[in-house]
Image (cartoon, helix red, strand yellow):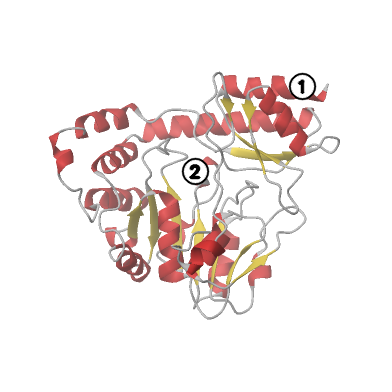
Amino acid sequence: MSRFWSTIVSELTPYIPGEQPKLPDLVKLNTNENPYGPSPQVLAALHEAANDSLRLYPDPSASELKQTLADYHGLNSAQVFVGNGSDEVLALAFMALLKHDAPLLFPDISYSFYPVYCKLYGIDYRTVALDDAMRIRPEDYQGPCGAIIFPNPNAPTGVDLPLAGVEAMLRDHPDAVVVVDEAYVDFGGESAVALVERYPNLLVVQTFSKSRSLAGLRVGCAFGHADLIEALERVKNSFNSYPLDRLALAGAVASLHDEAYFQQTRQAVIASREQLAADLTELGFEVLPSVANFVFARHPQHDAAQLAAGLRARCVIVRHFNAPRISQYLRISIGNVGECAALMAALRELLS
């Protein structure tokens, strides 16, 4: 601890992202990245944008991207917010919308950045236990609260809450903001963007990192009533008035214009997920029903940490969380066909 630190720094336990090892011949299935590259239209747009204009600041309002997102989802641009990845969008939402006298609610097994934000911004929170099937139950969120946030599909489980359940929470808490974190929704979930027009207390957060293969550009967005979006804009413009650079803006817009490529790659990931779930089940794993670009699985006869170590020794990296209720699960990102085959070969060798 440095004597120059602010008091809060020593009290923080930062979020730990999945490692990014630089090893040869690595099968990397630990950070939920898309196994397929960006749209060729994105690469062309980046090439075109990499010119003398980079000496100029980008559009601080990201007007073209906001309008393109609004058109894509049938909204107006005043209902759209963008930022540097969904983590920045979430951070601004925690500051602008989720700090109240009553506690913030989120699942006990959920995105582990949520308690980090709460500590950083001094937000009181309470976790709500998933049921025995690792599902969110809306009825468990009834009663007074300051706000609610949850991933849908959930992370790291991959299990989704149907849209009717999301709507039940919105109806139960008309005076509290409900944030639905949809980082993985494009892989088979139901998006709550369809509810934005009907519920002024709903904020939906999405990312270009997963289904649009743009994790390296850092583009996130949110959809909600103009009043919620204005709160995000006020905080953003008090912190960083130029959040997205010219290349990120150009790439994100181009990705939204190539719907055919988006559908092709997301369907390829979905097909690989279903095949991987079946293959793991055949090996004796218990696999939760996932609609994300990963599966969450455990083997009743084998310790998860030892399996993860054994896979690593075979140059296959998966994610293991040493946390209550989930310490015997592995979260396995969906790779391409060859990567999934390499994973299964390594597992068969380990289990034999």
User: Who's the residue at 58% across and 67% down the image?
Assistant: 168
Query: x, y (%) of residue 93?
Result: 43, 64
- What label sits on residue 222 in the rendered view? none
Horizontal side, residue 273 vs residue 344: left or right:
left
Residue 212: percent from left, percent from top? 42, 37
Give the residue displayed 50% in from the left and 75% down from the top: 176
Q: Residue at x 51, y 27 (%)?
A: 22
Name which quarter of the figure residue 172 lies in: bottom right
Amino acid under disc 2: Asp
Q: Residue type at mark 1? A: Arg
Question: Can you give x and y, in whole percent of width and height, for residue 195 in the image?
Answer: 46, 61
Q: Quadrant of the C terminus?
A: top right
Between 47 and 143, the residue placed more toward the observer is: 47
- In the rendered image, the residue lying farthest to the front is 3
Q: Determine contact: label 1, label 2, CB under 8 Å.
A: no
Relative to 191, does residue 101 appear above or below in the rendering? below
Q: Is residue 181 left or right of residue 68?
A: right
Residue placed most toward the observer, 188 or 111:
111
Residue under pointer 2: 186
Q: Earlier in the sequence, mark 1 or mark 2?
A: 2
Residue 95 seen from this side:
yes
Q: Which residue is mark 1?
A: 348
